[in-house]
Structures are given as structure tokens and as C-alpha cells.
Image (tube, rainbow, N blue to C red):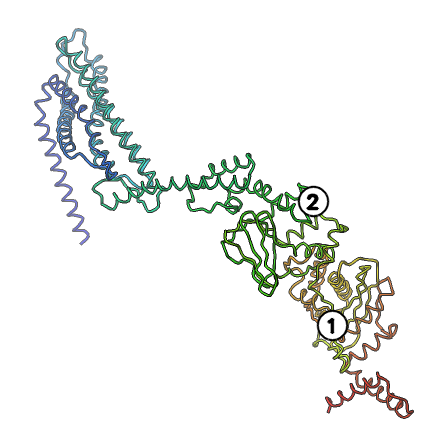
């Protein structure tokens, strides 16, 4: 099947070749008379070339603009007329080309009679030179004529010009324009070649020819002017369409569809509305800059940035407020700092703690301000919600609305909200290594009033960090503010008297294979010194070691700082003693243990700079154990470590014991904690109680308490 198909194709090709050869032979016979009359042939070519050159500019008048529908139409009458005459002249020029080729073939091997009869002509010397010059004339004229006869105007105007659209519109349009102009060169050259081959008779022939060329030049210039004017108008349509949402760029041909006409009209209307909106936004920006009294240099910087980044052209629907100018966009990079400094500097000076701060330092705090806006009557801080920022009002009014009997109050422009954060900052700056939680808004909520609110917010943690870098810890004003702050954090765990009076809680040994490190500390809030103590025991309750770190005149800013330092010091002491690599660090400081259980190096803004090195040291010691856990215990079950810490108050050097006899209180605590020693201790106390009864002595308050405890133990054992 495939072989038969191949033979069919080959047969068809052979038949086509025979037809082409036949047509060439017939064409030779038709143009043979032209070969015998060279002068008449060139005269005829000259006339046809002049007519053809005169017709070509008419193609440029075919496009017509429909101003009503904003589209391109076509003059069909002119199109038909020009195509007919152009086709006729092209056909005549084609016959001239064929005649020239056949003439060349006919004379290739013959010496022209006029040359043979020329005096001094020698075939051996002169024929090569004459043939060579005539050959190059033939080749050049043939190339020019072939270029001149190409149907570029028909394709460029009738096909290409009315179908341009899309992203390559500009490039394609320029290519077509260049093609139209460049093809005119070979067509004008065709006139010159035809003119050079025969002489013009009569004294008026040459002036008439020059007048024709002058008129032709005017004709061509007018046609190009008309055509490029239309091209310019359609280019404007195209650019407007690209900038308008929903517009589809096309060739704008009137007969495409009603939808395209409507789209173009809508595009132009949208562009007009767009320009109006841009003008309105410019007016709003100028109004905002004036209302906030921005300096002239800042205004010029804003205007320059708007022009460079074309922000108004890119976004039409905008809210002209402080958030429009101060944000993270490239447009805002250059203008945000001058605006924040101008708006924020005076607002910060209205806060008592910043009143005496130098301007250069306050400017750095201005750069941390965040623009915020609140819609009218909208609540933005609810009751019992942490107040985590100061709010400085630029425009509008906010109100605290009391819900539990607290009075309501308002804050207007150039005022601020968040006085409670001043006391919170002062207290945590002076007295905390791990900050109090942010104060809650109690008794009401905060909302915007009748107008939208425009403000700058300053985060509480940024204020605290600024204070650490700027303020003096001995400032009387800060000390007074810190004293006025009521701390919400009290992580000192006290003994429960009910539990102590009923039954002592017992220390619990760790699981098999683990060891337990009980830690405790004593901290003096006046002198800021501390003493540490620890007891290390295995899973059987057996004592491994005891250690204490006495008062070495080191200052600890608060209990959290002292407790963290205690755990780090005693963990460091225990590393070499824990053979299994599994340890439980236990303390009665619940606040500290809760923090360490979540990871000592976890991100937490409440951790101050003075505490971070200690937490890093704890994390380093944790990594030295195979497994390390933190656990909280009641103070009664941590009695052994408490006794060691109390003993360390009176010593200055670190000390360790393997036998606890040097601390009598520790011996008693260890006997109470160890379950296998608890029964013998109870029997000894019962014997002592019996002796006291036999001697008739009265039962002491302590004996009564022990008796009640033993009774409970007996009931539980039974």
C-alpha cells in the first residue's frame, strides 16, 4: 500500500513538471515578438513603470477612520480599482521580465550585428568585455524588477494592517511601514532603468518627465502623511486599551464585531474616568500633607516618589491616610522615616517618661512606630484583653467605654492611650529579668468615635527595649513609676498550712535508671544576693551527693534570675555524677519550672537581656545529658534541698558532701523523704510518746500533731 502511494506521488510530480515545461515554451512563443524589438520593449516598460509608481500611493488611502465607532473601515471602491490596475501593471511588468530573460538567452551565443561591424572590433579581445558589462546590467535590472513586482502593498494594507493586535502590535506595524517605503525604491529605479535604454525625442520630453517626478513626489508624500496619521491614531487606541481592564486589543476593524466596537468605546471612557480619579487622589494627597503640616522638603520627596513609582496610575482606589505613606512597599522606603519623625516626635514628647529624652534618640523610637487606622465606632481593644501598645492619635477621637462602673473618657488628636504601660515598663526595666505579663484592659473597652481614627502605635516590648538602651536605672521618675506598678507575678510558692498540719508530703524517688536533682535557693530582695542548695539521689532514694553555693556577693535582679542561676550552677555540678545520663531537675519554683519545661531558649519577649546568658548556659548543660526533664514539686517534698540552701546562706564558698551528718536539719529531711526509713522513724516517735505518757507529762502541741499524723497513717495502712 505504501509503495503504491509513493508511485502515485511520483507520477503526479512528473505530470506537473511536463505542464510547467509546456507553459514556459508557450510563454516563449508569446513574447518572441518582443525580443525582436528591444527599443519598443523598453519604451513600453518605461510607460508601465510610470503608471505603476503612480498607482502605488493609492493603496495608502484605502484605510478610513470611523470616528463614531472608533474603528478602521475600508474604502472598497478604491480598493477594487487599485487592485485591478496594479494587477494589470504587474502582469505587463512580468511579461517584460520574461522577455528580457528570453532575449538574454537568445543572444548569449551570438555577436550583435552592431558590434561586429564596429571599426576596430576583434572578437578575441572585445567580446568578453562587452558581454561582461551587459551581463551585470542584466542581473541588476532583473533583481530590481523582481523586487518591484512583489505584491507588498496588497499584503501590507489589505491583509496585515487590518489584522494587527496583541502584544506584538507595535513591532509588526513598524515592519509593515518599513516594507512599504523600501519597496518604493526598486519601483522608482525601474523608471530610471527604462529611461536609460532609449532616448527621449522632442524638446518638451525631458521637462515633462521632470514635472511628472515632482508631481509624483507630492503624491507619495501626501499618501504617506495620511497613512501615518491613521497609524498614529490606532496606536493611541491600542495603548489606551492595554491600560483598561476588560479591553481586548485587536486591529480595530469595524466589521469584526459589535463587541469590539463597544470594548474600544468603553476603554476610552474608562481611561477618561481613570484620569479623573487620578486627579482626585492627587488632591487628597495634597490635602493630607497640608493637614499634617509636613515640611516642604518632605512634600517634595513624596511627590517625587509618587511620580517615579507611578503609584497613582497603578492603584486607583486608595485611602489617603498614614498607612498609605508608611508601609513596606518600595514607594514608601524613601518617605516613611521623614513622615514618622515629623508626626511622632511631638507625640512622644507628650509622654512624661520621654519628655527629657534627646531628639536624636526619640527619632530612633519614631522609626519603630506602626501606622494604624480604625473605622468609625469600631472597638479595637476589648475588656480583659492585653494592652500591648501605646496608641498616639493623629486624626479622630477614641473612647474608653466603662462596662463595670468605671468612668468613660475620651482621647483626641495629639493625645495618647496607654499610661499603664509606662508603669509596667518602669517596673520590668528596674526589677525583672522575666517580665510581668502585659496589663489587661479591665472594666471596659476602647473604640473609635464618630469619625475614623488615624494613629501611630508603639509596641510595649519596643518601649521596654528602648528604655534598656536609654534610661538610667537610678532615675527617680522611673523608680516612682515602678513603685506604683502592682505586679501580677508572684512565683514564690508557699507551704500550705493545711497540708503541713495534717500529713507531711513525701519525696518520691525517680523511675528505675534515673536520678533526681532537687534544687532550692534563698534570695534577699534588698541586697539582691542568693544562696543555692541541691540534693542528688538515685532511684532507690540513696544519696549520691549534696552541694551548696554560698553568698558570693553576686547580684540577682529578681527571684527568676536567682532561680535560673541556681539550676544552672547545680546542673553543672551534677554532670559528672550522673552515670546513666538520665536526670530529673526538680524545684518548688513553679513559675520557673513551667518556663523551662517549654524550652529555655524558646522565643519569648518577656525574657530580658540579663537573663538570656543564664538560659543559654542551662540549654548547654541540658545537651550534656542523655535525657533531661524539669519537674515541679511542693516545697514540703523539696525540704532537703531547702535545708541545704538555708545552710549555704552562712558560707561563701561552694561545698559538697557525700555524708550529710554535718547538717543536722538535712539528716532529718532525708529520713522523712526516704520511704524505707520512714517506718523506723515512726516507731521511734511512738516509743518516745509512750515514755512521756508513763511519766505523766502533758502532751505537747508537736506531740499531738505527730499523734494525729500517725493515726492517719495507721488508718491508711490498715
Q: Image point 70% across, 48% down: which residue?
A: 469
Q: Which residue is mark 2?
A: 357
Disc 1 is placed on an element classified as strand
Where's the N terminus, which quadrant?
bottom left
Decide which of tag 2 and tag 1 comes sooner along the chain. Answer: 2
Give the position of the C terminus as an image quadrant: bottom right
Give how far across and how far down residue 75 sits, in percent: 17, 34
Residue 278 badge: none
Disc ID at residue 516: 1
Q: Nearer the viewer, mark 2 or mark 1?
A: 2
Name the spot of residue 175 as percent of width and height, x first.
30, 33
Q: Considering the numbered disc 2 on the image, is that residue within a helix, a strand or a loop?
A: loop
Residue 359, compared with residue 406, is above or below; it is: above
Left or right: 619 as drawn, with respect to 24: right
Q: Residues within 10 Å of mark 1 (few under 14, many from 20)?
A: many
> In this orientation, which residue lies closer to the viewer: 42 or 351?
351
Q: Position of residue 319 (x, y in %)?
A: 46, 47
- Residue 82: x and y, percent? 15, 30
Mark 2 Cα within 10 Å, few/some/many (few <14, many 20+)? some
Q: CA distance from mark 2 to mark 1?
A: 51 Å
Q: Is residue 580 left or right of residue 441?
A: right
Q: Residue furthest top?
A: 119
Q: Which is more toward the observer, 163 or 605?
A: 605
Say if 546 sits above or below 321 in the image.
below
Amino acid at each position: 500500500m505504501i509503495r503504491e502511494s509513493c508511485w502515485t506521488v511520483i507520477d503526479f510530480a512528473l505530470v506537473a513538471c511536463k505542464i510547467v515545461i509546456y507553459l514556459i515554451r508557450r510563454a516563449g512563443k508569446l513574447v518572441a515578438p518582443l525580443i525582436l524589438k528591444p527599443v519598443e520593449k523598453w519604451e513600453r516598460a518605461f510607460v508601465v513603470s510610470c503608471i505603476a509608481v503612480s498607482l502605488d500611493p493609492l493603496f495608502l488611502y484605502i484605510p478610513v477612520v470611523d470616528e463614531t465607532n472608533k474603528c478602521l473601515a475600508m474604502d472598497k471602491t478604491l480598493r477594487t480599482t487599485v487592485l485591478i490596475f496594479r494587477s494589470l501593471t504587474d502582469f505587463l511588468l512580468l511579461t517584460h521580465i520574461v522577455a528580457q530573460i528570453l532575449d538574454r538567452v537568445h543572444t548569449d551565443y551570438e555577436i550583435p550585428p552592431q558590434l561586429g561591424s564596429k571599426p576596430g572590433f576583434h572578437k578575441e579581445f572585445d567580446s568578453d568585455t562587452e558581454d561582461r558589462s551587459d551581463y551585470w546590467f542584466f542581473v541588476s535590472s532583473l533583481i530590481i524588477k523582481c523586487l518591484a513586482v512583489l505584491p507588498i502593498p496588497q499584503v501590507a494594507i489589505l491583509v496585515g494592517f487590518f489584522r494587527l493586535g496583541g502584544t506584538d502590535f507595535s513591532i509588526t506595524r513598524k515592519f509593515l511601514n518599513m516594507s512599504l517605503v523600501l519597496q518604493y525604491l526598486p519601483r522608482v529605479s525601474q523608471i530610471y532603468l527604462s529611461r536609460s535604454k532609449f532616448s527621449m525625442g522632442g524638446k518638451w520630453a525631458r521637462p515633462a518627465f521632470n514635472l511628472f517626478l515632482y508631481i509624483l513626489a507630492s503624491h507619495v508624500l501626501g499618501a504617506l502623511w495620511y497613512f501615518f496619521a491613521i497609524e498614529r491614531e490606532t496606536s493611541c487606541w491600542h495603548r489606551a486599551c492595554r491600560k483598561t481592564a476588560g479591553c481586548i486589543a485587536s486591529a480595530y476593524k469595524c466589521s469584526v464585531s459589535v463587541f469590539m466596537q463597544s470594548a474600544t468605546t468603553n476603554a476610552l471612557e474608562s481611561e477618561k474616568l481613570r484620569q479623573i480619579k487620578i486627579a482626585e487622589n492627587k488632591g487628597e494627597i495634597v490635602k493630607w500633607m497640608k493637614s499634617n503640616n509636613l515640611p516642604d522638603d518632605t512634600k517634595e520627596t513624596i511627590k517625587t516618589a509618587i511620580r517615579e513609582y507611578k503609584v497613582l496610575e497603578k492603584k486607583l482606589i486608595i485611602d489617603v491616610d498614614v498607612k498609605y505613606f508608611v508601609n513596606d512597599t518600595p514607594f514608601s522606603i524613601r518617605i516613611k522615616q521623614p513622615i514618622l519623625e515629623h508626626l511622632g516626635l511631638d507625640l512622644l514628647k507628650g509622654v512624661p517618661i520621654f519628655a527629657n529624652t534627646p531628639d536624636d534618640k526619640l527619632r530612633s523610637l519614631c522609626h519603630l512606630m506602626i501606622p494604624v487606622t480604625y473605622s468609625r465606632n469600631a472597638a479595637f481593644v476589648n475588656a480583659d484583653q492585653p494592652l500591648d501598645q501605646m496608641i498616639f492619635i493623629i486624626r479622630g477621637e477614641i473612647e474608653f467605654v466603662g462596662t463595670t462602673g468605671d468612668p468613660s473618657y475620651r482621647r483626641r488628636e495629639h493625645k495618647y492611650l496607654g499610661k499603664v504601660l509606662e508603669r509596667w515598663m518602669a517596673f520590668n526595666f528596674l526589677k525583672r529579668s522575666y517580665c510581668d505579663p502585659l496589663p489587661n484592659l479591665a472594666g471596659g473597652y476602647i473604640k473609635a468615635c464618630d469619625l475614623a481614627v488615624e494613629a501611630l502605635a508603639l509596641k510595649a516590648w519596643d518601649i521596654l527595649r528602648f528604655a534598656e538602651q536609654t534610661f538610667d536605672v537610678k532615675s527617680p521618675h522611673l523608680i516612682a513609676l515602678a513603685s506604683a506598678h502592682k505586679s501580677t507575678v508572684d512565683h514564690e510558692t508557699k507551704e500550705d498550712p493545711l497540708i503541713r498540719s495534717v500529713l507531711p508530703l513525701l519525696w518520691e524517688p525517680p523511675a528505675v535508671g534515673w536520678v533526681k536533682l532537687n534544687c532550692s535557693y534563698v534570695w534577699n530582695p534588698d541586697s539582691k544576693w542568693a544562696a543555692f542548695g541541691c540534693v542528688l539521689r538515685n532511684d532507690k532514694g540513696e544519696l549520691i551527693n549534696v552541694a551548696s553555693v554560698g553568698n558570693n556577693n553576686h547580684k540577682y535582679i529578681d527571684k527568676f534570675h536567682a532561680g535560673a542561676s541556681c539550676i544552672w550552677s547545680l546542673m553543672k555540678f551534677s554532670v559528672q555524677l550522673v552515670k546513666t545520663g538520665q536526670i530529673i531537675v526538680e524545684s518548688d519554683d513553679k513559675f520557673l519550672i513551667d518556663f523551662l519545661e517549654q524550652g529555655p531558649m524558646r522565643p519569648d519577649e518577656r525574657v530580658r537581656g540579663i537573663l538570656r546568658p543564664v538560659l543559654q548556659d542551662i540549654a548547654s548543660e541540658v545537651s550534656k545529658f542523655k535525657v533531661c526533664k524539669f519537674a515541679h514539686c511542693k516545697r514540703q517534698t523539696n525540704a532537703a534541698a531547702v535545708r541545704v540552701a538555708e545552710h549555704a546562706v552562712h558560707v561563701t564558698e561552694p561545698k559538697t558532701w557525700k555524708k550529710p551528718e554535718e547538717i543536722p536539719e538535712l539528716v532529718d529531711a532525708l529520713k522523712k523523704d526516704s520511704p524505707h526509713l520512714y517506718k523506723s522513724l515512726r516507731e521511734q516517735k511512738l516509743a518516745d510518746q509512750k515514755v512521756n505518757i508513763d511519766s505523766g507529762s502533758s502532751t505537747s502541741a508537736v506531740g499531738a500533731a505527730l499523734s494525729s499524723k500517725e493515726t492517719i497513717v495507721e488508718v491508711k495502712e490498715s
